[in-house]
Amino acid sequence: MMQQQEQPPIQAASPAPMLVQLGASQNFLVNNRPARWIQVLDVDPSYQRARTPSPNRSPALSVYVRAPETEVHYWAVFLRDLTVQELIKRVVQKYGFSTDERDRVRLAVRVTDHGVQRLGDEDVRSMESEVAIDVKVTSLDPESEDWQLELRY
């Protein structure tokens, strides 16, 4: 009697990319121009929505961050408090920094065409919701082990 060889399961091909229209309040920039549509490439079937610590408290601000050298897509970051420390904490958490690495990020600066400015809490409070931010982590100075977040928005 001939034994049947076990066949690997057939995996369905990923669905074709689809365009999704953004809501009026969702501001994404593509090549520094506003985008009203985004292309969804795939959906992660293992994704589970993060549980919020307090269901009665919604985020005070949501922003989108990416590392432009390595990423094309932006990641949502939700701030509960409108402070620089909360912004730093949430960005480094999003990028999976270890506890030791998180403690080494000391400040955040905004980089513009006109120069570099240290961010204060009032700058975070005046940020527009859903703003797209390019993030880069750099050393504070050559002799220091401390880092700073450079933000472009």
Image: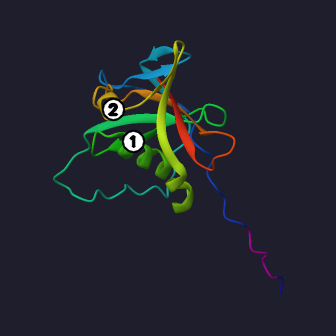
Circle 1 residues within 10 Å: few <14, some 14–19, many ≥20: many
Q: Extreme front residue here?
A: 143
- Quadrant (top left/top right/bottom left/bottom right) for the N terminus: bottom right
The magenta-colored residue range is 3-7
The secondary structure type at the circle numbered 2 is: helix
Report the front residue among 147 and 133. 147
Q: Say which label, 1 or 2, has the lower sequence index.
A: 1
**Kind of residue sitting beneath label 2:** Val
Relative image position of residue 48 (x, y in whole percent): 41, 57
**Kind of residue sitting beneath label 1:** Leu
Report the front residue among 108 and 74. 108
* Residue 19 seen in the current view: no
Report the front residue among 92 and 149. 149
Relative vertical location of residue 30 with respect to residue 120 in this rendering, above or below: above
Relative image position of residue 63 (x, y in whole percent): 39, 34
Which is the main secondary structure of the residues drawn in magenta?
loop
Report the front residue among 148 and 35. 148
Relative vertical location of residue 49 with respect to residue 114 in this rendering, above or below: below
* Residue 150 seen in the current view: yes
Left-right relation of 10 to 100: right
Q: Which residue is mark 2?
A: 124
Residue at 47% over, 52% down: 93
Relative vertical location of residue 143 with respect to residue 22 in this rendering, above or below: below
The reply to whether the C-beta atoms of the residues labelled 1 and 2 are less than 8 Å apart is yes
Residue at 57% over, 44% down: 147
Relative image position of residue 80 (x, y in whole percent): 28, 46
Residue at 46% over, 44% down: 91
Q: Is residue 57 magenta?
A: no
Relative image position of residue 65 (x, y in whole percent): 48, 35
The secondary structure type at the circle numbered 1 is: helix
Q: Which residue is mark 1?
A: 87
Query: Residue 97 shows which numbered tag?
Result: none
